[in-house]
Image: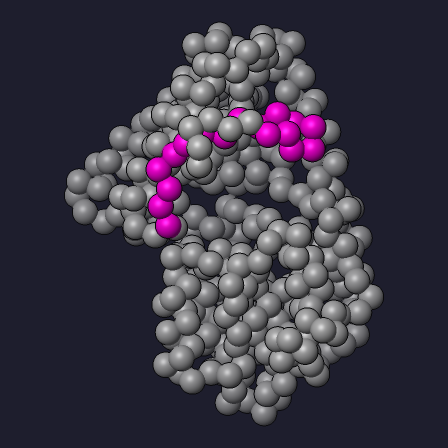
Amino acid sequence: NSLWAIEEVEGIRVVRVKTFISANEGTLLRTLDYMSFMVAGFIASLFVKRVDLIIGTSPQFFTSIAAYLAATVKNVPWVFEVRDLWPESIRALDVISSSSGSKLLNMFERLELFLYKKANVIICVTDSFRKNLISRSIEPTKVKVITNGVDLNFFKPHNEKDTNLSIDLGLQGKFVAGYIGTIGLAHALETLVDAAVELREDPTGDDISLVVIGDGAKKQELIKLKETKKLRNILILDSIPKSLVPKHLNLFDVSIIHLAKKDLFKTVIPSKLFESMGTGVPVAYGVEGESRKLVLKHNIGRIFEPENGKDLAQCLIALKENRAELSLFKDNSLKAAEQYSRTHMANRLLAILDEVIKKG
């Protein structure tokens, strides 16, 4: 976190700047964290020469403000990449409920619309996001969709589970259902704890183990919930380096993907879905909306109702007891992954960026 640091990452020059850093909890401190990068990033951009195009990505929202300001100062086009509808997502999670907080969100939404209108092109990661923006009077021709994808050189299947890792985690002989990622408000992972309770009480589920790997604002609460219910069939582990994610994913018989039961999340496609495809791991899918249609279209897993632990438990038991179906889901996942290759998505994005630069 030095004032100014330059490094090369896979041939790309990366400039890092000093920011205020806070833990992933607490609205005020996180907002200050985000805003500090907005200021530091914008100032740093003034010293970066020979710029043809600027891209701002959201979340977090304040990054895009810095991108717009930098593009204005340098008189170059800018692209707004929308990976989450912010601040709509904050409102949906009821993080800010006071009258003053609501007014603040309304102000941010006006700023959000201003940025959409000023961007030369908007890149969305779902069709639902695109429809949302068009319904808010954003010009349809400048709103493009490029979904998340998967690096098939990084996420790939292993023929067998890592025996040493299974032993270390006490998972040998178990049917393993796992989650890797953020343990936050949006993910409602207490549903997994509820499922663990159901599995403990069901003789057909006593050989199923749940694994949660990650960190976030709700992690300690999740650990406390597990301890209160005296559960031994769910492990809650610390975050792991990205390099180890495929190894742990291949340890799973099923990948659990879950988001809270909110209308907002009907519009998202979690990147975990594509990573599971790439490793050939079937999914137990607890997300409604657009992404659920992908799971059904490619036939890569079973669906369960979000925030319904009993339904998740029954979903896992069904997957465990039908190995032929599980094998079919695995094969279908690997086939589907080819359609969402990161390389394919990157080439589509490059074509759009080239067009933006040509138009100036």
| Residue positioned 17% across, 43% down in the render | 99
Q: Which residues are magenta?
A: 7-23
Query: Is any part of residue 280 visible from this angle?
Result: yes
How many marks do you count on the picture? 0
Q: Is residue 12 magenta?
A: yes
- Asked if residue 317 lies left or right of residue 163, the reply is left
Q: Is residue 15 magenta?
A: yes
| Residue positioned 31% across, 37% down in the render | 32
| Residue positioned 64% across, 20% down in the render | 353
Question: Residue 335: where, in percent of width, then height?
Answer: 80, 53
Question: Residue 254: where, in percent of width, then height?
Answer: 66, 68
- Asked if residue 203 lies left or right of residue 84, the reply is right
Query: Is any part of residue 309 visible from this angle?
Result: no
Question: Residue 130: where, in percent of width, then height?
Answer: 52, 34
Question: Residue 304: where, in percent of width, then height?
Answer: 55, 67
Give the quarter of the figure containing the C terminus.
top right
Query: Does 62 appear above or below 240?
Result: above
Q: Nearer the viewer, residue 240 or 256?
A: 240
Quarter occupied by residue 249 = bottom right
